[in-house]
Image (spheres, grey):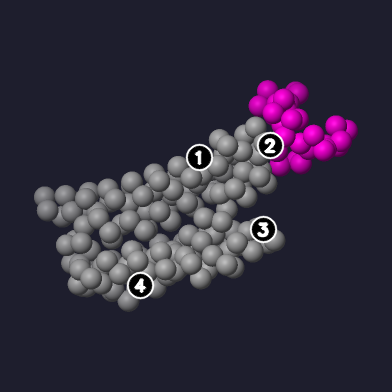
Amino acid sequence: MGREPEDEPSPQDQLTQPWLDQRQEEPKAWSSHRRWLVLLSFSYFSFSNAVMIMDFATDYALSEALLGASQSDVALLYSLFLLSVMPAMFFAAYGVVHHNDATMAIGQSLNVLGAWLRYAAVINGSFPLAVVSTVCAGASASVIVCSYAVIGRRWFRPSQRGLATTIAVQSNYAGWAMGSLIGLAVHADVGA
């Protein structure tokens, strides 16, 4: 009937915002249960993007065979991913602060497009499709990198921001780990 214990402001929340009038209500997002769904969605976004950065980077022989590319071409994909983040970062940094919903939608759309292009690249053995996929995923990663602190600040009260930011960042590391294992798992299946 009442608010859940986690929804009660903590003493830390009151100390971190002494300038707020105590009669003023806190943002509705801080007490909404949607905040956890937003964090889960963002964490999946970050996780899946990190999988794409690592999927071709762990087993060059397998990636060369799947894409019909040389070892240096496959190595270029990892570097191209990182290089794609930089120019998009300027737009993402502005968009995440001033047009958050639209920027997140664009970032997630680029991530989905990058994943489908990556799938098509493997199915068709097409290195050019893998390059386009990498650019889309890299541009999407710029939105992710600019959003870690914004998600916490927008959706969580001060006492929960550290946890929210940690979950979001660790989901990216989990994606790197999973992406590293995918090549090994596929190689084991193909080799068996």
Q: Does the segment drawn in magenta span residue 21? A: yes
| Amino acid type at image mark 4 | Val
Residue hosting label 2: 157
| Amino acid type at image mark 3 | Val
* Residue that sits furthest to the left in the current view: 192
At horizontal 27% and vertical 66% (from top left) the residue drawn is 75
> What is the C-alpha distance between the residues marked 1 and 3?
20 Å
Q: Earlier in the sequence, mark 1 or mark 3?
A: 3
Mark 4–mark 1 CB contact (< 8 Å) = no
Nearer the observer: mark 4 or 2; the answer is: 2
Residue hosting label 3: 97
Residue 15 appears left or right of 58: right
Counting from the top left corner in percent of width and height, residue 46 is at 47, 51
Residue 40 appears left or right of 4: left
Q: Nearer the viewer, residue 122 or 54?
A: 54
Answer few, some or many: residues within 10 Å of disc 1's Cα (few below 14, many 20 plus, some between 14 and 19): some
Residue hosting label 4: 131
